[in-house]
Image (spheres, rainbow, N blue to C red):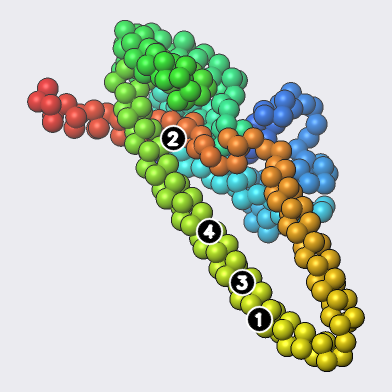
Amino acid sequence: MVALDVCLYILSALGGLVVGSFLNVCIYRLPRGEFFSKSRSFCPNCKSPIKAYDNIPVLSYIILRGKCRSCGERISPRYPLVELLTCALWVGNYAAFGLDGMTIVYDITVAVLIVAAFVDLDTFEIPDSGIVTLLILGAITFAPFGGVSWQDKLIGCVCVSVPMLIVCLFGGMGFGDVKLYFVLGLLLGWKKILVVFLLSVVLGAAVSVVYLVIKRRKAAADDSIENSGEQDEERCSVDFSDAGRADDAKVVAVGEEREETFAEDKSEEGQASAVGEVSDVSDEDDDPLPKSKKGSVVPFGPFIALATVVTLYVGDALISIYARLLGL
Protein backbone atom coordinates (compact mmCIF):
# COMPACT_ATOMS: atom_id res chain seq x y z
CA MET A 1 0.00 0.00 0.00
CA VAL A 2 2.85 2.36 0.82
CA ALA A 3 4.53 1.51 -2.48
CA LEU A 4 1.29 2.29 -4.33
CA ASP A 5 1.02 5.65 -2.59
CA VAL A 6 4.60 6.50 -3.50
CA CYS A 7 3.96 5.58 -7.14
CA LEU A 8 0.82 7.72 -7.23
CA TYR A 9 2.68 10.68 -5.70
CA ILE A 10 5.39 10.31 -8.35
CA LEU A 11 2.79 10.07 -11.11
CA SER A 12 1.06 13.18 -9.77
CA ALA A 13 4.36 15.07 -9.73
CA LEU A 14 5.37 13.99 -13.24
CA GLY A 15 1.87 14.65 -14.56
CA GLY A 16 1.94 18.12 -13.00
CA LEU A 17 5.29 18.93 -14.63
CA VAL A 18 4.13 17.79 -18.07
CA VAL A 19 0.80 19.60 -17.81
CA GLY A 20 2.62 22.67 -16.48
CA SER A 21 4.72 22.72 -19.65
CA PHE A 22 1.52 22.62 -21.69
CA LEU A 23 0.05 25.43 -19.57
CA ASN A 24 3.03 27.62 -20.51
CA VAL A 25 2.04 27.15 -24.14
CA CYS A 26 -1.55 28.13 -23.29
CA ILE A 27 -0.43 31.23 -21.36
CA TYR A 28 1.69 32.39 -24.30
CA ARG A 29 -0.60 31.48 -27.19
CA LEU A 30 -4.15 32.11 -25.96
CA PRO A 31 -3.86 35.93 -25.79
CA ARG A 32 -2.25 35.92 -29.25
CA GLY A 33 -4.89 33.71 -30.85
CA GLU A 34 -2.29 31.06 -31.71
CA PHE A 35 -3.58 28.21 -29.55
CA PHE A 36 -4.63 26.01 -32.47
CA SER A 37 -1.44 26.67 -34.38
CA LYS A 38 0.27 23.49 -35.59
CA SER A 39 3.73 24.93 -35.10
CA ARG A 40 6.03 23.45 -32.49
CA SER A 41 7.17 25.31 -29.40
CA PHE A 42 9.63 28.04 -30.34
CA CYS A 43 11.84 30.69 -28.79
CA PRO A 44 9.87 33.97 -28.51
CA ASN A 45 13.03 35.91 -29.39
CA CYS A 46 14.60 34.14 -32.40
CA LYS A 47 11.53 32.00 -33.33
CA SER A 48 13.73 28.88 -33.59
CA PRO A 49 11.84 25.62 -32.92
CA ILE A 50 12.68 24.09 -29.55
CA LYS A 51 14.08 20.57 -29.76
CA ALA A 52 12.38 17.83 -27.77
CA TYR A 53 15.43 17.38 -25.53
CA ASP A 54 15.34 21.12 -24.75
CA ASN A 55 11.68 20.96 -23.79
CA ILE A 56 11.92 18.77 -20.68
CA PRO A 57 10.06 20.55 -17.85
CA VAL A 58 12.38 22.34 -15.37
CA LEU A 59 15.37 20.11 -16.23
CA SER A 60 16.00 21.74 -19.62
CA TYR A 61 15.83 25.19 -18.04
CA ILE A 62 18.52 24.18 -15.52
CA ILE A 63 20.77 22.53 -18.14
CA LEU A 64 20.52 25.53 -20.48
CA ARG A 65 21.01 27.92 -17.54
CA GLY A 66 17.85 29.75 -18.45
CA LYS A 67 18.96 30.65 -21.99
CA CYS A 68 17.86 29.72 -25.50
CA ARG A 69 20.25 27.26 -27.14
CA SER A 70 19.96 29.02 -30.52
CA CYS A 71 20.22 32.74 -29.72
CA GLY A 72 21.39 32.80 -26.12
CA GLU A 73 18.51 35.06 -25.05
CA ARG A 74 17.38 34.62 -21.45
CA ILE A 75 14.26 32.50 -20.93
CA SER A 76 11.70 33.87 -18.49
CA PRO A 77 11.78 32.09 -15.09
CA ARG A 78 8.00 31.98 -15.37
CA TYR A 79 8.27 28.77 -17.42
CA PRO A 80 9.81 26.58 -14.70
CA LEU A 81 7.72 28.43 -12.08
CA VAL A 82 4.46 27.40 -13.78
CA GLU A 83 5.70 23.82 -14.15
CA LEU A 84 6.74 23.57 -10.50
CA LEU A 85 3.53 25.24 -9.33
CA THR A 86 1.37 22.80 -11.28
CA CYS A 87 3.46 19.90 -9.97
CA ALA A 88 3.07 21.08 -6.35
CA LEU A 89 -0.69 21.57 -6.67
CA TRP A 90 -1.27 18.19 -8.28
CA VAL A 91 0.72 16.49 -5.54
CA GLY A 92 -1.21 18.54 -2.98
CA ASN A 93 -4.51 17.47 -4.54
CA TYR A 94 -3.61 13.81 -4.25
CA ALA A 95 -2.43 14.30 -0.66
CA ALA A 96 -5.66 16.10 0.26
CA PHE A 97 -8.26 14.07 -1.65
CA GLY A 98 -6.59 10.74 -2.38
CA LEU A 99 -7.49 8.50 -5.28
CA ASP A 100 -10.90 10.00 -5.98
CA GLY A 101 -12.87 11.46 -8.86
CA MET A 102 -12.72 14.91 -7.23
CA THR A 103 -8.93 14.79 -7.42
CA ILE A 104 -9.13 14.75 -11.21
CA VAL A 105 -11.72 17.55 -11.17
CA TYR A 106 -9.52 19.69 -8.91
CA ASP A 107 -6.42 18.92 -10.97
CA ILE A 108 -8.15 20.35 -14.03
CA THR A 109 -9.50 23.25 -11.96
CA VAL A 110 -6.09 24.37 -10.68
CA ALA A 111 -4.62 24.02 -14.18
CA VAL A 112 -7.28 26.34 -15.59
CA LEU A 113 -6.80 28.78 -12.70
CA ILE A 114 -3.05 28.95 -13.33
CA VAL A 115 -3.64 29.86 -16.96
CA ALA A 116 -6.33 32.39 -16.03
CA ALA A 117 -4.12 34.03 -13.41
CA PHE A 118 -1.05 34.46 -15.62
CA VAL A 119 -3.01 35.57 -18.68
CA ASP A 120 -4.83 38.10 -16.51
CA LEU A 121 -1.48 39.40 -15.26
CA ASP A 122 -0.32 39.87 -18.86
CA THR A 123 -3.47 41.17 -20.54
CA PHE A 124 -5.96 42.13 -17.80
CA GLU A 125 -8.34 39.59 -19.34
CA ILE A 126 -9.42 36.09 -18.33
CA PRO A 127 -9.64 33.76 -21.37
CA ASP A 128 -13.13 32.51 -22.18
CA SER A 129 -11.72 29.04 -22.90
CA GLY A 130 -10.89 28.68 -19.20
CA ILE A 131 -14.37 29.82 -18.20
CA VAL A 132 -15.94 27.29 -20.58
CA THR A 133 -13.72 24.49 -19.22
CA LEU A 134 -14.78 25.21 -15.63
CA LEU A 135 -18.41 25.50 -16.75
CA ILE A 136 -18.23 22.03 -18.30
CA LEU A 137 -16.67 20.66 -15.09
CA GLY A 138 -19.42 22.28 -13.06
CA ALA A 139 -22.11 20.83 -15.33
CA ILE A 140 -20.58 17.34 -15.15
CA THR A 141 -20.45 17.47 -11.36
CA PHE A 142 -23.79 19.27 -10.97
CA ALA A 143 -25.39 16.17 -9.47
CA PRO A 144 -24.41 15.61 -5.80
CA PHE A 145 -20.67 15.16 -6.16
CA GLY A 146 -17.87 15.94 -3.75
CA GLY A 147 -20.30 16.39 -0.87
CA VAL A 148 -22.07 19.40 -2.43
CA SER A 149 -25.75 19.20 -3.42
CA TRP A 150 -27.08 20.61 -6.65
CA GLN A 151 -29.11 23.18 -4.67
CA ASP A 152 -25.92 24.50 -3.06
CA LYS A 153 -24.25 24.70 -6.46
CA LEU A 154 -27.20 26.52 -7.98
CA ILE A 155 -27.12 29.10 -5.18
CA GLY A 156 -23.34 29.27 -5.53
CA CYS A 157 -23.70 30.39 -9.15
CA VAL A 158 -25.49 33.59 -8.22
CA CYS A 159 -24.75 34.47 -4.59
CA VAL A 160 -21.44 36.16 -5.50
CA SER A 161 -21.56 36.63 -9.27
CA VAL A 162 -24.80 38.66 -9.31
CA PRO A 163 -23.63 41.28 -6.76
CA MET A 164 -20.26 41.42 -8.54
CA LEU A 165 -22.06 41.92 -11.85
CA ILE A 166 -23.61 45.07 -10.40
CA VAL A 167 -20.16 46.20 -9.28
CA CYS A 168 -18.87 45.42 -12.77
CA LEU A 169 -21.55 47.60 -14.38
CA PHE A 170 -20.24 50.54 -12.34
CA GLY A 171 -16.67 49.85 -13.43
CA GLY A 172 -15.46 48.35 -10.15
CA MET A 173 -14.54 44.92 -11.57
CA GLY A 174 -13.89 43.21 -14.87
CA PHE A 175 -16.56 41.00 -16.44
CA GLY A 176 -14.07 38.12 -16.62
CA ASP A 177 -13.88 38.10 -12.81
CA VAL A 178 -17.68 37.93 -12.62
CA LYS A 179 -17.77 34.94 -14.96
CA LEU A 180 -15.02 33.25 -12.96
CA TYR A 181 -17.03 33.65 -9.74
CA PHE A 182 -20.08 32.19 -11.52
CA VAL A 183 -18.41 28.99 -12.73
CA LEU A 184 -16.51 28.50 -9.46
CA GLY A 185 -19.79 28.84 -7.57
CA LEU A 186 -21.27 26.14 -9.78
CA LEU A 187 -18.29 23.92 -9.04
CA LEU A 188 -17.84 24.54 -5.31
CA GLY A 189 -21.27 25.46 -3.95
CA TRP A 190 -22.39 28.59 -2.10
CA LYS A 191 -20.47 28.03 1.13
CA LYS A 192 -17.07 27.66 -0.46
CA ILE A 193 -17.61 30.37 -3.07
CA LEU A 194 -18.31 32.79 -0.22
CA VAL A 195 -15.00 31.75 1.32
CA VAL A 196 -13.32 32.29 -2.05
CA PHE A 197 -14.90 35.73 -2.33
CA LEU A 198 -13.85 36.85 1.15
CA LEU A 199 -10.30 35.55 0.77
CA SER A 200 -9.88 37.10 -2.68
CA VAL A 201 -11.10 40.49 -1.44
CA VAL A 202 -8.77 40.39 1.59
CA LEU A 203 -5.79 39.31 -0.53
CA GLY A 204 -6.58 41.86 -3.23
CA ALA A 205 -6.97 44.67 -0.70
CA ALA A 206 -3.72 43.78 1.08
CA VAL A 207 -1.68 43.64 -2.13
CA SER A 208 -3.31 46.83 -3.44
CA VAL A 209 -2.39 48.72 -0.25
CA VAL A 210 1.21 47.52 -0.46
CA TYR A 211 1.29 48.43 -4.16
CA LEU A 212 -0.02 51.93 -3.52
CA VAL A 213 2.47 52.50 -0.69
CA ILE A 214 5.37 51.41 -2.91
CA LYS A 215 4.07 53.54 -5.78
CA ARG A 216 3.79 56.64 -3.57
CA ARG A 217 7.26 56.11 -2.12
CA LYS A 218 8.67 55.76 -5.60
CA ALA A 219 6.90 58.94 -6.70
CA ALA A 220 8.23 60.76 -3.62
CA ALA A 221 11.75 59.50 -4.37
CA ASP A 222 11.45 60.67 -7.99
CA ASP A 223 10.27 64.09 -6.83
CA SER A 224 13.20 64.28 -4.39
CA ILE A 225 15.66 63.44 -7.16
CA GLU A 226 14.03 66.02 -9.44
CA ASN A 227 14.18 68.71 -6.74
CA SER A 228 17.80 67.83 -6.03
CA GLY A 229 18.57 68.16 -9.73
CA GLU A 230 16.91 71.58 -9.86
CA GLN A 231 18.98 72.73 -6.87
CA ASP A 232 22.15 71.50 -8.55
CA GLU A 233 21.19 73.41 -11.68
CA GLU A 234 20.67 76.57 -9.62
CA ARG A 235 24.08 76.16 -7.98
CA CYS A 236 25.69 75.61 -11.38
CA SER A 237 23.89 78.69 -12.67
CA VAL A 238 25.21 80.78 -9.77
CA ASP A 239 28.74 79.44 -10.21
CA PHE A 240 28.53 80.04 -13.91
CA SER A 241 27.27 83.57 -13.30
CA ASP A 242 30.16 84.33 -10.97
CA ALA A 243 32.62 82.92 -13.41
CA GLY A 244 30.91 84.87 -16.14
CA ARG A 245 31.33 88.13 -14.28
CA ALA A 246 35.06 87.42 -13.86
CA ASP A 247 35.28 86.59 -17.53
CA ASP A 248 33.36 89.74 -18.38
CA ALA A 249 35.91 91.78 -16.51
CA LYS A 250 38.63 90.19 -18.56
CA VAL A 251 36.63 90.63 -21.73
CA VAL A 252 36.10 94.30 -20.98
CA ALA A 253 39.83 94.64 -20.61
CA VAL A 254 40.29 92.99 -23.97
CA GLY A 255 37.41 94.76 -25.68
CA GLU A 256 33.61 95.06 -25.92
CA GLU A 257 33.48 93.10 -29.16
CA ARG A 258 34.51 89.81 -27.56
CA GLU A 259 32.00 90.40 -24.74
CA GLU A 260 29.14 90.68 -27.22
CA THR A 261 30.30 87.53 -29.00
CA PHE A 262 30.40 85.65 -25.70
CA ALA A 263 26.86 86.79 -24.83
CA GLU A 264 25.53 85.69 -28.23
CA ASP A 265 27.11 82.24 -27.85
CA LYS A 266 25.53 81.78 -24.39
CA SER A 267 22.14 82.82 -25.78
CA GLU A 268 22.35 80.21 -28.55
CA GLU A 269 23.36 77.52 -26.05
CA GLY A 270 20.40 78.41 -23.84
CA GLN A 271 17.98 78.15 -26.78
CA ALA A 272 19.41 74.77 -27.80
CA SER A 273 19.08 73.53 -24.21
CA ALA A 274 15.45 74.65 -24.08
CA VAL A 275 14.67 72.85 -27.35
CA GLY A 276 16.31 69.69 -25.98
CA GLU A 277 14.20 69.79 -22.80
CA VAL A 278 10.96 70.15 -24.80
CA SER A 279 11.97 67.22 -26.99
CA ASP A 280 12.64 65.03 -23.94
CA VAL A 281 9.23 65.80 -22.45
CA SER A 282 7.41 64.97 -25.68
CA ASP A 283 9.26 61.65 -25.92
CA GLU A 284 8.26 60.69 -22.38
CA ASP A 285 4.60 61.49 -23.00
CA ASP A 286 4.55 59.48 -26.22
CA ASP A 287 3.65 56.16 -24.61
CA PRO A 288 1.52 53.81 -26.74
CA LEU A 289 0.40 51.67 -23.78
CA PRO A 290 -2.97 52.48 -22.23
CA LYS A 291 -2.83 53.64 -18.62
CA SER A 292 -4.47 50.46 -17.32
CA LYS A 293 -1.58 48.46 -18.76
CA LYS A 294 1.10 50.56 -17.08
CA GLY A 295 0.45 49.52 -13.50
CA SER A 296 -2.41 51.81 -12.45
CA VAL A 297 -4.70 48.77 -12.05
CA VAL A 298 -4.04 45.48 -10.25
CA PRO A 299 -5.66 42.46 -12.01
CA PHE A 300 -8.06 40.61 -9.72
CA GLY A 301 -8.01 37.18 -11.40
CA PRO A 302 -4.83 35.97 -9.63
CA PHE A 303 -6.42 36.69 -6.23
CA ILE A 304 -9.53 34.68 -7.13
CA ALA A 305 -7.30 31.82 -8.30
CA LEU A 306 -5.19 31.88 -5.12
CA ALA A 307 -8.28 32.12 -2.90
CA THR A 308 -9.81 29.13 -4.71
CA VAL A 309 -6.72 26.97 -4.17
CA VAL A 310 -6.66 27.87 -0.47
CA THR A 311 -10.38 27.09 -0.21
CA LEU A 312 -9.92 23.68 -1.84
CA TYR A 313 -7.50 22.68 0.91
CA VAL A 314 -8.77 24.46 4.04
CA GLY A 315 -12.21 25.72 3.03
CA ASP A 316 -14.10 23.17 5.15
CA ALA A 317 -11.96 24.03 8.18
CA LEU A 318 -12.59 27.76 7.71
CA ILE A 319 -16.34 27.18 7.38
CA SER A 320 -16.34 25.07 10.58
CA ILE A 321 -14.43 27.76 12.50
CA TYR A 322 -16.83 30.44 11.31
CA ALA A 323 -19.86 28.30 12.24
CA ARG A 324 -18.46 27.77 15.76
CA LEU A 325 -17.90 31.49 16.20
CA LEU A 326 -21.54 32.08 15.29
CA GLY A 327 -22.66 29.26 17.59
CA LEU A 328 -24.19 27.27 14.75
Precedes in sequence: disc 3 or disc 1: 3
Q: Which residue is identified by label 3? A: 234
Q: Residue 97 carries which label?
A: none
- 141 or 174, which is in the foreground? 174
Q: Which residue is identified by label 2? A: 303
The alpha-carbon separation of the residues under discs 3 and 4 comes to 16 Å
Q: Which of marks 3 and 4 is in front?
A: 3
The alpha-carbon separation of the residues under discs 3 and 2 comes to 48 Å
Amino acid on which disc 1 is placed: Asp
Residue 301, compared with residue 159, is above or below; it is below
Asked if the residue under mark 4 is in contact with the one under mark 2, i.e. CB atoms within 8 Å, the reply is no
Q: Nearer the viewer, mark 1 or mark 4?
A: 1
Asked if the residue under mark 1 is in contact with the one under mark 2, i.e. CB atoms within 8 Å, the reply is no
Q: Which residue is identified by label 4? A: 223
Around disc 1, counting alpha carbons within 10 Å, would you say few (fewer than 14), some (14 to 19), or many (20 or more)?
few
The alpha-carbon separation of the residues under discs 2 and 4 comes to 32 Å
Amino acid on which disc 4 is placed: Asp
Amino acid on which disc 3 is placed: Glu
Q: Which of marks 2 and 1 is in front?
A: 1
